[in-house]
């Protein structure tokens, strides 16, 4: 997304949307809507949980935040700094970040082929972490 396009979008946000975007940008880890709601309340910014959900959906649609669904089914939100990739254990729910992007070139080719403007992508592998594999192997 071009810098000027992002600036225009940010100028058209409501005050609540801007508060949420600012908070998400400050965080170094993804948070759920519920956790963001609590943080905002603790900072003295009063808004209902439904408002937080609606604002996050708008910010996601505009490409200003990204969301990821955990193995529990809960969505967590973060700012779009870089694409994120994870191994997620279906047993314990632990997520391990993958630092390199194995599909960056593919994304560019697909964008070109399908005339699609990608804001971000999420790549997730599901299986068993090493600790849960040991537990599984220990079962008779």
Image (cartoon, rainbow, N blue to C red):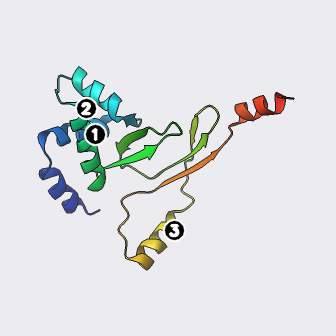
Cα distance between the residues tagged 1 and 3: 33 Å
Judged by depth in the image, the label closer to the viewer, 3 or 2, is: 2
User: Which residue is nearer to you in this view: 84 or 75?
Assistant: 75
Q: Residue at x 46, y 44 (%)?
A: 69
The image quadrant that residue 8 belongs to is bottom left
Label 2 CA crowd tier, 10 Å (few <14, some 14–19, many 20+): some
Cα distance between the residues tagged 2 and 1: 6 Å
Q: Is residue 51 left or right of residue 109?
A: left
Instruction: Say which element carries label 3.
Output: helix
Instruction: Say which element carries label 1.
Output: helix
User: Which residue is nearer to you in this view: 122 or 80?
Assistant: 122
Instruction: Say which element carries label 2.
Output: helix
Instruction: List the single residue furthest toward the right.
Output: 140
Cα distance between the residues tagged 3 and 2: 38 Å
Work out whether residue 63 can be spotted: no
Q: Residue at x 83, y 28 (%)?
A: 138
Q: Residue at x 29, y 62 (%)?
A: 1
Q: Which residue is mark 3?
A: 105
The image quadrant that residue 74 belongs to is top left
Tell me residue 21's x, y (percent): 25, 42
Q: Is residue 70 above or below residue 83?
A: above
Residue 49 shows which numbered tag? 2
Q: Is residue 88 left or right of residue 34?
A: right
Q: Which residue is mark 1?
A: 53
Label 1 CA crowd tier, 10 Å (few <14, some 14–19, many 20+): some
Tell me residue 134's x, y (percent): 78, 31
Q: Is residue 122 left or right of residue 138?
A: left
Tell me residue 63's x, y (percent): 30, 55
Q: Check whether the beta carbons of the residues at disc 1 and disc 3 lie within 8 A of each other.
A: no
Q: Check whether the beta carbons of the residues at disc 2 and disc 1 lie within 8 A of each other.
A: yes
């Amino acid at each position: 997304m071009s810098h000027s396009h992002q600036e225009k979008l940010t100028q058209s946000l409501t005050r609540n949307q801007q508060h949420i975007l600012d908070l998400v940008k400050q965080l170094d880890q993804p948070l759920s809507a519920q956790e963001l709601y609590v943080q905002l309340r603790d900072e003295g910014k009063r808004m209902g949980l439904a408002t937080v959900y609606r604002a996050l959906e708008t910010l996601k649609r505009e490409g200003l935040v990204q969301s990821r669904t955990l193995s529990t089914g809960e969505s967590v939100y973060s700012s779009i700094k870089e694409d994120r990739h994870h191994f997620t254990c279906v047993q314990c729910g632990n997520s391990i970040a993958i630092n390199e992007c194995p599909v960056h070139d593919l994304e560019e080719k697909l964008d070109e082929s399908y005339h699609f403007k990608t804001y971000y992508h999420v790549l997730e592998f599901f299986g068993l972490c090493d600790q849960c594999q040991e537990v599984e192997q220990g079962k008779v």
